Amino acid sequence: MNKKFSLCAIASILMLSGCTWVKTTPEGEKVRVLDATEVATCKELGAATVSLVDKVAGIERDPQKVRKELELLARNSAARMGGDTVVPASDISDGQQRFTVYQCVGVDQ
């Protein structure tokens, strides 16, 4: 019985580690993720540091899913700041990443 329970628990943890837990707000859906070379004519509004759980029960989540969810969180944060674009400003470390927030649409060129 204990072996069966352990296998079920491990399977559940592995399935959860692949789930996407972050949802984009309607405003966040309008925010783009660009490279630093693409925002030269944009107005910098500030920075957003976002974080999430990158390990479940000691098991690391898929790095691509973590990266994507951090981008979603940054997009949501940028929308709250009045921004329409984010650029990663740091590498991912312990489920945390910093983004620079920009306003690009409507900025005089």
Image: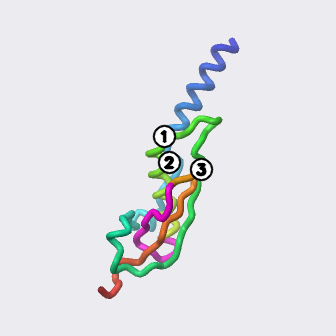
Q: Is residue 28 magenta?
A: no
Q: Quadrant of residue 7?
A: top right
Could you say where residue 36 lies in the image, as x and y percent from the top left? 38, 68
As drawn, is 2 to the left or to the right of 54? Answer: right
Above or below: residue 34 compared with residue 3: below
| Residue at image mark 3 | 94
The quadrant holding residue 33 is: bottom left
Vertical side of 51 occupied by 13: above or below: above
Q: Residue furthest right?
A: 2
The alpha-carbon separation of the residues under discs 2 and 1 comes to: 6 Å
Magenta extent: 79-91
| 35 over 58 or under it: above or below | below
Q: Residue at x 60, y 22 (%)?
A: 8
Specify the label residue 66 is tagged with.
2
Q: CA distance from mark 3 to mark 2?
A: 10 Å
Residue depicted at 56% across the width and 52% down the height? 93
Per the rendering, the mark at residue 62 is 1
| Mark 2 in CB contact with mark 1 (< 8 angstroms) | yes
Q: Residue at x 43, y 67 (%)?
A: 86
Left or right of residue 2, residue 45 in this image: left
Residue occupying the point 41% across, 63% down: 29
Q: Residues within 10 Å of mark 1 (few under 14, many from 20)?
A: few
